[in-house]
Amino acid sequence: MLAALVTLTLGCGASEQAPSPSGDAPASETSAGGDSESASTGPTGPVVLGDMLEPFDPPPLEKLVSGNEWIDRTVAGGDERLREILAERPEPELSVEEALAIKNDSSEANEKISAALGQLAPEDRSGVDDTATFVRHVGGDLKTINPLLMSSITDFEYQDLTGIGLLTNDIEGRTFAPSEVVESWQSSEDHLYDKFVLRDDLTWSDGEPVTAHDFAFTFKAIMTKDVIVPAVRTGPDELRAVIAYDDQTLVVFHKASLATNDGNMQFYALPKHIYEKTIPDDPMLSRSKEHSRLEDHPVVAGPYELVKRVRGDEFVVRRREAYYLHDGKQVRDKPFLKEVRIKFIEDFNTALLALVQGDIEEMMLRAEQWETQTSDAEFYKRNTKVTQPEWTEFHFTWNVKSPFFSDPKVRWAMTYAVDYTELIETLCYDLYEQSQGNFHPDSWMFPKDAPEPVKQDLDRAQQLLAEAGWEDTDGDGVLDKEIGGRRVPFEFTMLTYQSENGIATATLMKESLDLLGIVCNVKPTEFTVLQQKLLDHEFEASMGGWGSGKDPATNVNIFGTGEGRNYGNYSNPEVDELFEQGKHEFDPEKRAEIYGKIHMKLWEDQPYTWLFYRAGFYAYSKKLRGYNLSPWGPYYYTPGVHSIFAPAQ
């Protein structure tokens, strides 16, 4: 699975937005310039694959190999890698049976339950029910099966089940090549080349072999002007070329020696034999009959394949026998689960009811649900729950090109307006930590001189608004200002999710702004509509959240000038330069200092009003084992969902 910088929206009033395959994800993302226009008009001439790349004449492989010093890099199975990490941790204090018999009502109980139920299946797979179906919950529908188009959490989770990539990350964020796909991985000592030898026993679901040519083709497709990719170009756009020297040998040529090179190589592969025929006719990947057909009948190479898709309801993937068997012999570990059913339930109260009744077997819980709705015997009859802090923050995004929020004094006024006590203690049940910016305090890139959390200060907010020219000149109770020769009242719309908590958080802000003479219209918006409005910058303010990528460099896609998920149009040349410095710095301490400076610059400019860091709260059926939480949640690392199993009854 690829790692990810993920847009989120589920916490104490949020909902899921967008992952990015960071080139690690569904951490990184999209380069923006010109994409919106291209998306609306389509190509104006013949589509040329890779037309965003500079001409490149690759050297002979023999010369490349002999002319460089090579370093062997880690190749491992996902289950193997996690098993090694868990072996270094203390032995569980409780047996599985004992852990399932207690309630998770304290941090001590949480540690005991997490350790016991996180133990992996026996290596000989004894006692595993390989006919089991895992029924998962998601809060947003599957938008696309195409890895180039993915832009939501659900899209990313589909790819994790069905896709393949060259590199991934373990539960501690370290990069490795999955041995299920890669036989060997070497990097040149100067960090300019990476050489992969792929296995020769992996096939696409239509029977065609997976080769190095598929990865080389996918890279060219990503770097094609008319192929509009909302989530995957940032990262790969730092690569000079991806060359298949034969069916198994792939060499990645980097533009520069960068600390982020590993992440830049993380993208899911497309089957060349399919898409080389379809992209020239439909580079939008969504308009032709064939691309429409592929949305329901995709060709995949991962452990699972799509067998059912009901839009607005669910999709189902089934274990691919040809993934772990080749010419009648087992060549990979057999996936534990026969099927994974992903149920889309937007309302989390409805989802919790489904969990208690046994209709789904997993879900992320909101703070309120963790605290007040999952502590009784009815919940514990079928389920248990676990929690861990996550590197995930939630915020209000201000569109700095809006006449309301172009002035940082106004943005700071918004930040001082928030009733943080009510937000954290009441809406979030005192389970979340007030945010101090985009990076989490537990992360290595959090600044040593971090800002103190803001306290509500309406007097300071009023003063800043007055300094920015906003006053009530006509006595109607609403602030106004002359803009473009006319008097404009301070009235704007805050987009938010349709969840109860999302609406409550935005409404809390509305109530605070009422006291300042500002009209904030809260507009709950359907997930896919909201996402598109953000991508198109068609909003004044919005509630959102970002989950951290494995490398903070992926944040350039959010805060870099003109970048694809810089929804609020923020721009600071100093921040852009710091992001550039961070890519080139290999010393961990110096890199941390650079990203700490970015954190502080963003805090100074307040393109967001940062609200809280979300803890991850998850409920699981007592039938399940092998789930482990990370700073990125239970799935955004390898093996993630693939370590979950059901014991034989």
Image (cartoon, grey):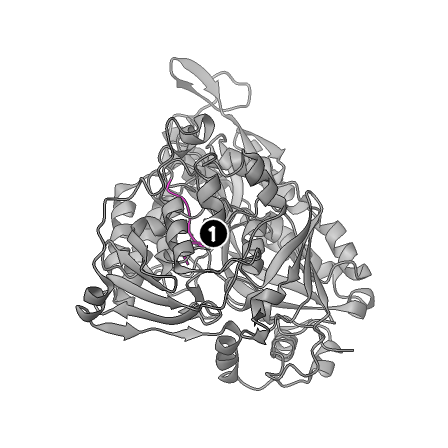
Residue 407 vs 70, above or below: the answer is above
Q: Which residue sits at x=55%, y=19%?
A: 476
| Nearest to the observer: residue 481 or residue 9 | 9
For disc 1, the marked residue is: 270
Residue 316 visible? The answer is: yes
Please state if 135 lies on the left or on the right of 517 as rendered.
Answer: right
Q: Position of residue 468 (x, y in %)?
A: 37, 29
Whole-percent x, y for residue 614 in the image = 55, 57
- Between residue 569 and residue 418, name the one nearer to us: 569
Q: Is residue 529 above or below residue 550?
A: above
The answer to which quarter of the image holds residue 463 is: top left
Q: Is residue 67 left or right of residue 370?
A: left
Q: What kind of element bears circle 1?
A: loop
Name the residue at the top extreme. Answer: 485
First to last magenta residue range: 21-31
The residue located at (60%, 47%) in the rendering is: 15
From the image, give the main secondary structure of the stretch colored magenta.
loop
